[in-house]
Image: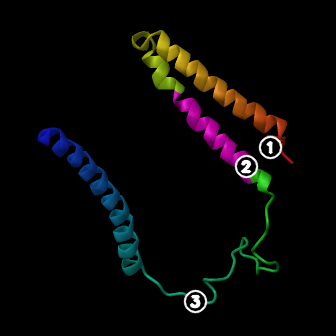
Amino acid sequence: MGESLNVYQNSYLFVIMFLFLGLLLPAVALTAGRFLRPSKPTAEKQTTYESGIEPFHQSWIQYNVRYYLFGLLFVIFDVETVFLYPWAVAYQKLGFFAFIEMMIFIVMLLIGLLYAWKKKVLKWI
C-alpha cells in the first residue's frame, strides 16, 4: 500500500514539475528577450509600412470572420489527417479493433466537414 501510494504521488510530482517548467521557460525566455534586444523606437519606425509609400489610410482593417474560420478548418482537418499515417503504418499489428476506431474517427471528421459545408463556411467570398 505504501509503495503504490508513493508511485501515485511521484506521478503527480512529475506533472507538477512539467507544468512549472512549461510556465517558467517561456517567461524566462520572454523576459531575457526584453532585456537583450535593442530598443530605440522613433516616430519613423513606428509608422505603418506600405511599400515605401506614406500611409494614407488607417492600418486597422476589419476582415470577414469567414477567412479565419476557413483557415481554422484547414488547420483542423490537416492536423487530423496526419493521424492517419501512423495508423496506416501500424495497421497490420493493430488489428480489427483499431480499424473500427479509425472508422469512427473518420466518420467524426466527415460529420464535421458536412456540418461546415452545410453552414457554408467553406464558401470563399
Gap in Å between the C-alphas at discs 1 and 3? 42 Å
Disc number for residue 68: none
Amino acid at circle 1: Val
Range of magenta residues:
68-83
Indicate which label's residue lies in the foreground, 1 or 3.
Answer: 1
Residue 57 x, y percent position in the rendering = 82, 78
Q: Distance between the residues labelled 3 and 2?
A: 37 Å
- Label 3 near label 1: C-beta < 8 Å? no
**C-beta proximity under 8 Å, tags 1 and 2:** yes
Q: Where is residue 110 in the image (x, y as percent from the top left)?
A: 70, 27
Q: Is the magenta stretch mostly helix, strand or loop?
A: helix
Identify residue for label 2: 69
Quarter-of-image position of residue 109:
top right
Q: Is residue 16 left or right of residue 2?
A: right
Is residue 113 found left or right of 6 in the rendered image? Answer: right
Q: Classify 35 as above or below 107.
A: below
Callout 3 amino acid: Thr
Mark 1 — residue?
121
| Residue 42, label in figure | 3
In this picture, residue 103 sits left or right of residue 52: left
**Number of residue marks:** 3
Residue at the image point whose x is 80% and y is 43% from the top: 121
